[in-house]
Image (cartoon, rainbow, N blue to C red):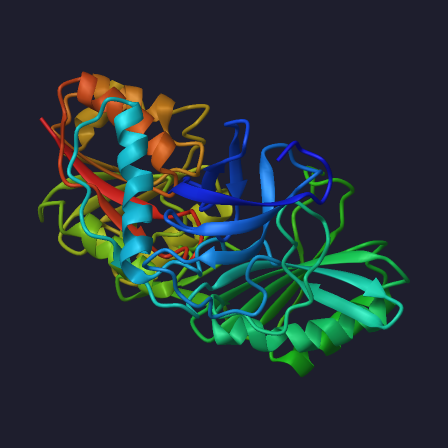
Amino acid sequence: MNGSTNEETEIAITAVGARGDGIGRDDAGRAVFVAGALAGDRVRVRTNAGAEGRADLVSVVAAAPGRAEPPCRHFLDCGGCVAQHMGDAVYENWKRGIVADALAHQGVAANVGPLARIRGASRRRARLFGVRTAQGAVIGFQAAGSHRVVDMAMCPALEPAIFALVPRLREFFAEILPPAARAEAEVQVVGAALDVVLRLPGDLDRQRRERLVRFAADAGIARIGWQRLGKGRRAALAPAETVAALAPVQAVFGGIAVTLPPLAFLQASAEGERALAALVTGQVPEGSRVADLYCGAGTFTLPLAHGRHVGAFDAAADMVAALDAAARGGGLGMRVKAVARDLDRRPLLAREFDAFDVAVFDPPRGGAEAQAREVAASKLKLAVAVSCNPVTFARDARILIDAGFEIGPVMPVDQFVWTRHLEVVAAFRR
């Protein structure tokens, strides 16, 4: 295997990496990464000229034990899932291994608990990509490492309500987009309501506004918003403009209904949210004064507020306002104090934790390094960490452990089914 374009060869797969790729070696001893391959497989691969060190799976010559039949026809074409070929035992070991490896890299000794599996057809948030073609429009996820849109005919990962919207979006994009133009749809299911923001090229004039309202009504969308489609992956976007709110968009946390702003952050699945909330509240004694950091719209705040007092902090002022209104309307106004504060730029200081007994934090993927250092310097004896990124979780755990905290079992929750992502929860005590 000398790296020439489209060369085919056979290799043995000896390991699976954190991204789900099988890892083997070519004739020169160089590592080769193969999507869809398992440790123990012998596979025929084709050199991927566009990505050094990668090869495309042509066929499985000899299958390893634990290989499963992928449930989706788009697997290995669509870039959404990487692990549909793994049987249950292989899959659980791989996911728990991602957490264990991240902890080991930071020198953190911890027990990684069993994987809490969340069912398929449960993902309630999705960014769908569309492009106008000569035949109409295609819509789906982008192929791995590409801007090519895989026209979605099925998706066993998504909530059925999201997938049911796909044909309607395909028709709408074919109608509204000029030739070769692209668009995006951010879709979220909140209870039984569809919350949608469309990113489209051009301006939101009166005619387009009316078409969006008609589309929402015909498709059963509760709320539809608009953003101008930016150029480039990291293009800055103005806040979404709500075009029509045809029905309430409310989440329920701890039995309290919260009216959400457009595309407010929610956990990736309703079942995963319940699992995480149970793990968090189960670690926090009743009667505690709790600082809920990166609180969002109250995923943990409101369950915790039953029997505890909670100070809730988040940078998103609209979500903090929604949480505050819900707490007051639900009879928890005396137990919840919600504050808009950017914890990355202005973390709660060590002395501010004198007003609390427990810190709970669930930061974005970048983690909570600055905030973890303040927790470490505080007098707190209990912190509960939630994270969607085992790597930054392990970094922040190291900070707390170095300050005298002991880490309890790390509980992985697999709400990003068939992907390399997962949530973790752990309590730290000193």
Residue 224 visible in the snapshot: yes
- Residue 50 in percent (x, y) is at 71, 38
Q: Quadrant of residue 13?
A: top left
For the point 46% across and 38% down, the residue is 24
- Residue 171 in percent (x, y) is at 76, 76
Look at the picture and state if 370 lies above or below 252: above
Of the pair 243 and 171, the residue shown nearer to us: 171
Look at the picture and state if 29 lies above or below 321: above
- Residue 351 in percent (x, y) is at 23, 19
Q: In which quarter of the image is residue 331?
A: bottom left
Image side of residue 93 versus residue 232, left or right: left
Quadrant in which the C terminus appears = top left
Quadrant in which the N terminus appears = top right
Of the pair 177 and 221, the residue shown nearer to us: 177
For the point 79% across and 73% down, the residue is 211
- Residue 186 in percent (x, y) is at 61, 58
Look at the picture and state if 182 lies above or below 402: below
Of the pair 97 and 224, the residue shown nearer to us: 97
Image side of residue 149 versus residue 68, left or right: right
